[in-house]
Amino acid sequence: MGTDEGEPAGQGEPEPALRRSTFVPAAAPTGTPPETPLVKPSDDPSATAPGKDEETHGDDELAGALEHEVSRLTASLPIIRPESLFMPVAPPEPPYEPHSDEEREIAKEADRGDTLAAIEHLEALIAVRRGDTAAIAVVQAAAPTDEAAASRTDQPSDRPAPPPSLPDEPPATDIAESPARVETEPAEDVVGAPAPQEHVGLATSEIPIPGVPELDADVTDDADDLVEPDSLLAPIATPRVRPHEDVLTAGMPEPMPLFAVEQSGSEPTPLEYRVGRASRLFWLWFAAGASVLVIGLGAALVEAGLNLLQVLIAAVLGIALSFIPLGLGSLAGVWSGQPTVIVSRATFGVVGNVVPAVLILIVRLFWGAALLWLLAVAVADTAVGVGWTADRPLVLWSVFAVAALVCIAVAIVGYSLVAAVQAIALVATAILAVAIVVVAWPRSGWGNVGSAAFGPWIGVVEGAVLVFSILGLAWASASGDLARYQRVGSAGTPTALWGGFGASLPMLVLVVFGAAVAVAEPGEAARFGADPVRMLVDTTPHWFAIPVVAAIAVGLMSALIVSLYSGGFAVQAVGFHLPRWASVLALGVVAALVAAGLLMATSGVRTLVLAYPTTLAVPIAAWTGIFLGDFVLRRRRLATDSLLRRGGVYPDWRWVNVIALVLITIIGLGFMHGAAPMLQWEGYLYRLLGIDPDGTLAASDIGVLIAMVLGITVGLISGQRAVPAQESASR
C-alpha cells in the first residue's frame, strides 16, 4: 500500500493509532512467552477501508514507528559492556544472503515483522548445528548479547527483558560462530530489516555502547551502575610554588607554646610561628646589653686620658659601627628564617663555611664561659664585701652551678622561653639601671667635668673599637638568630634599627655614666675601671647592694642565655649532626667547664673584659665584613634549601672569600696591641713598619677596623659575579 504524498504527515485527518506491544512475564524459564500479535492497519477495525479518503500507511512506516517505540521502551535496560566493543572495528561485511531453507524461513519471519519468532528460530538453529542441546535452555534464559541487543532495537518486541548475562558465560559471538561452517556471518547480519532501509540512532557493533565493565554485588538490578557520569571529578589543582618562595599555612599564625622545645635548627623557621614584629627585637636585645659591668668600660676610657665628651663620641661611634652587623644580620635572619651562621654558607660555600663557623663557635664558647665567670665572681665578691657571708668559695660555686643550670635549661627549651625571659629581664634591668644611676650619681666633683682636658684623639678610636668589639662584633653572629621568628613581610629598615637600638641604648647610658663618675672623682677612676661592682657597693647605702647584685645577675644571665642559644646553631654549622637542644646542651657543658677553669685560675676582671674580646674581634670583623659585603649585593631572597645540602645553588667552596678570611685575620692581628701576657705576640706588623708596638697608635687596636674594611671590600668585589650567578640559578 502506498502513502499519500500529497498531504504531509500531521495535517488533515489524524493518523491511525498504533497498538503498542506490551511486556508479559514469562511463565517458565524455558517456555515461550505469550505474544501479543501486531495488529496491522488492514486488520484494525478502526482503520478505514481501501478506497476511502483516509490516510493509509505502508509496512516500512509501520516498521519504523515500531522500531522507535521499542527503542524507547528498552532504553532503560542495563547494558553490559562486552569486551568486543572495545576491540578494533573490522570492516563492514557485505549484506547477508540466506543460503539454506532454515535461513530463508528466518528471513521471512523477520520480513513479516515477527522479530521474536525469528530470533528464537535462529537460536534453536545455532544450538542444533553445534550439537549442544543444553545450550538451547541457556540461550533462552540468557540476556541478549551485544549482537542480539543491537538487532532487537530494529524490531518491536512485546516480551520482557531477560536478566543480564553473567560475566562467565560465553559471548554470543562465540555461539554464533560455527566451526563446521566458515562462511557463517555474524548474527547481527542475520536478523534485521533489508539492507536499503536506514535506521537512525541504532546501536551497532561499530558504535561503542556506554556501559559499565562489571556488576557489583550491592543490588540485584545494579541500578546504580546503569550510567557512568559524563566526566569524572577532576583532581583539585595544587598551586605551583617556587622552591624558595614563602607560603603561608592555612589559618592565622600563632606563637610557639611557652615551654615547647624548639625543633628548628639549621632549617627555616616554620611560618606558623613567625608572628613577631620588628619592635620585639628591642626588648630581646635590651637586657643583653644592659650589664652593669660595662660601667667599668667608661671608667677605663677616662683612665686612658679621655674626657667625658671624648668618651661620649667614642661610645656613639662604636654603637654606630655595631648597627652594621646587628642590623644587617637581623635582616638576613628575617629574609631566610635561618641562623646567621647558616646563612653565611651562601658567602663562603656550603663546605667552606666550616672555617668561619669554627671561629664563631670559639667566640660563643668564650663569651659563655666569660659571662658565667663574671657572674659568679661579681656576686661572690659583693656578698663578702657587704658582710653577708665570709665563705666566698661557697657563694662562688653555688652561684656558678645555679646560673649554669638555669641558663642552659632556658636555652635548651628554645626561642619561646628565651623571648619570655628577655621580656621580664627588660623590665628588671631597666628599673635597676635607672636606680643605680640615680643612687650612685656623684654628688660632687662636677667642676672636674668641665675642666678636664682633651686626651689624644687616637684614644677615641680605641674607645670606639672597644665598644664595637664588646657590642657589635660579640653579637654579630647572634643577631639573625633572634630575628628568625619575625613576620615574613617585616620591613627591612625597622628590623635593622630596632635590634641595634635595643642593644646599644642601655650600653650608651651605662658607659657615659661610668665615665661621668670617673671624671667627677679622678682618684677613683682606676679602681672603678678595675672593679666597678665593688666601687658601686662602697659608694652607695648598705641596702643598695641587693639591687646591684640583682642587676648583675639579670643582665649577665640574659646575655649568657642568648650566647648559649646562638652557640647551638654554630655547633650544627660546624658539622655536628645533633638536634638543636643537644647542641645547646653540649656547648653549655663545655662553657661551664671552661668557666670553672677560669674561676680556679684568675680573678681579674679587667684583663678578661678588655684584652681578649678585641683579639677575638679581629677574625669576627673579617667574617662580618665579607658576609655583609656579599649580602648587600643580593636582590633576591636566599635559596634556603640549598643552604642545607651540597649540590644546590651555592657551591661547596667560595675559595676567594675563605682565603681572604684567613689573610685578613692575619693582617688585622698584626695591627693589634696585646695587653694580656698571652697576647704579646700581636702587633708584629708594627715592628715590620718601624712603629712602636707599645705606642699610642698601636694601643688603638686599629686592626679591628682594618679587618672590617678589608672584609667589606673583598665581599663587594668577589660578589660582583658570584651573587648574580647564584640568584640566576635559584630562579
Image (cartoon, rainbow, N blue to C red):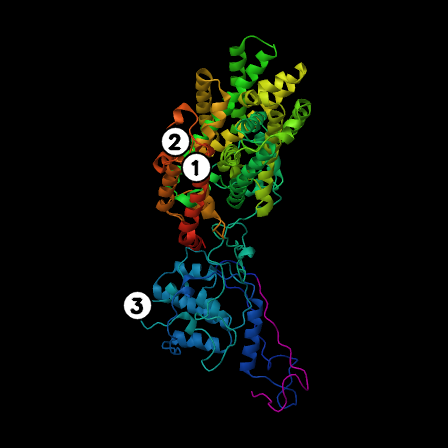
Q: How crowded is mark 1: few (under 14 residues within 10 Å), some or many (20 or more)?
A: many
Q: Does 642 sit above or below residue 302?
A: below
Nearer the camera: disc 1 or disc 3:
1
Q: Of the numbered discs in the image, which one, if any, rests on residue 564?
A: none
Q: Which amino acid does label 1 sit on?
A: Gly
Task: Please state which of the two labelled residues, at mark 2 or mark 3, is closer to the viewer.
Answer: 2
Asked if marks 2 and 1 touch (Cβ < 8 Å), the reply is: yes
Residue 12 lies within the magenta run = yes
Residue 392 colored magenta?
no
Give the residue type that dot 2 points to.
Glu
* Residue drawn at point x = 62 percent, y = 79 percent: 44
Q: Considering only order in the chain, which callout, 3 or 1, is on the residue closer to the N terminus?
A: 3
State which tag comes first along the sequence, 2 or 3: 3
Real-space CA distance between mark 2 and mark 3, rounded to the nearest whole angstrom? 112 Å
Q: Residue 682 carries which label?
A: 2
The quarter of the picture where residue 10 lies is bottom right
Q: What stretch is highlighted in magenta?
A: 1-24
Residue 603 or 181: which is nearer the viewer?
Answer: 603
Which residue position holds label 1?
703
Q: What quarter of the picture does the N terminus occupy?
A: bottom right
Look at the image and tell me whether residue 385 can be seen: yes
Q: Does the residue at mark 2 contact the one at mark 3 (Cβ under 8 Å)?
A: no
Query: Residue 487 falls in which quadrant of the image?
Result: top right
| SS category of the residue bearing label 1 | helix
Camera-side residue of 153 and 336: 336
Please, what is the dominant secondary structure of the magenta stretch? loop
Q: Which of 315 and 213 is in front in this view?
A: 315
> Which residue does the numbered mark 3 point to in the structure image?
180
